[in-house]
């Protein structure tokens, strides 16, 4: 049915605006959330919202959306990198808010989530906290 395609469409629009128009990205990501029934990609809408708010330097809105994304993200292995990105963004927000202990916790959790070849990027960010 048309119903299941719609959120997909909105989320793609949101994603396309993420690099240029943060408010539009936020608008479409929110719209996708309102149409989603049991879409397992709901975490992705939250991830886009978090990313857009982060770019707008609205750290509390970014953090709350990334935290929800982290709760909703499926546990399967193919989502590990996305989960690590969410945690790394939470680390970045904590660091920007001068909450260094939290930043270190998030980066450490991100490290435990990713495969060996992805660890370098997380370690780099962790190094920047010190």
Image: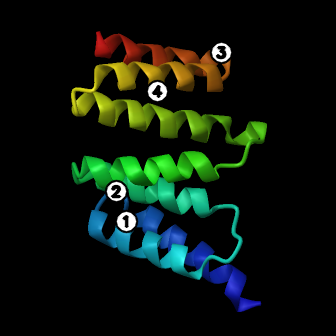
* Residue drawn at point x = 28 percent, y = 69 percent: 23
* Closer to the camera in the image, 130 or 1: 130
Which badge, 3 or 4, is on the more N-terminal residue? Answer: 4
Quarter of the image with the N terminus is bottom right
* Closer to the camera in the image, 72 or 30: 72
Residue density around tag 3, few if under 14, some if 14–19, many if 20 or more, within 10 Å:
few
Mark 2 highlights which residue? 52
Distance CA(mark 4)–CA(mark 2): 20 Å
Q: Are marks 1 and 4 in contact (CB under 8 Å)?
A: no
Which label was assigned to residue 106? 4
Quarter of the image with the C terminus is top left
Which badge, 1 or 2, is on the more N-terminal residue? Answer: 1
In the displayed structure, would residue 89 be above or below residue 104? Answer: below
Distance CA(mark 3)–CA(mark 2): 28 Å
Mark 1 highlights which residue? 17
x and y percentages locating residue 50 in the rendered image: 40, 53
- Secondary structure at badge 3 equals helix
x and y percentages locating residue 96 in the rendered image: 23, 32
């Amino acid at each position: 049915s048309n119903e299941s395609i719609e959120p997909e469409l909105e989320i793609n629009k949101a994603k396309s605006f993420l690099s240029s128009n943060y408010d539009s990205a936020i608008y479409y990501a929110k719209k996708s959330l309102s149409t989603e029934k049991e879409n397992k990609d709901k975490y992705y809408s939250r991830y886009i919202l978090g990313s857009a708010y982060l770019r707008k330097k609205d750290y509390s809105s970014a953090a709350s959306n990334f935290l929800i994304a982290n709760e909703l993200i499926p546990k399967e292995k193919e989502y590990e990198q996305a989960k690590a990105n969410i945690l790394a963004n939470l680390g970045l927000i904590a660091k920007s808010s001068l909450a260094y202990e939290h930043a270190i916790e998030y980066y450490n959790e991100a490290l435990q989530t990713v495969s060996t070849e992805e660890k370098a990027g997380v370690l780099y960010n962790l190094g920047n906290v010190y």
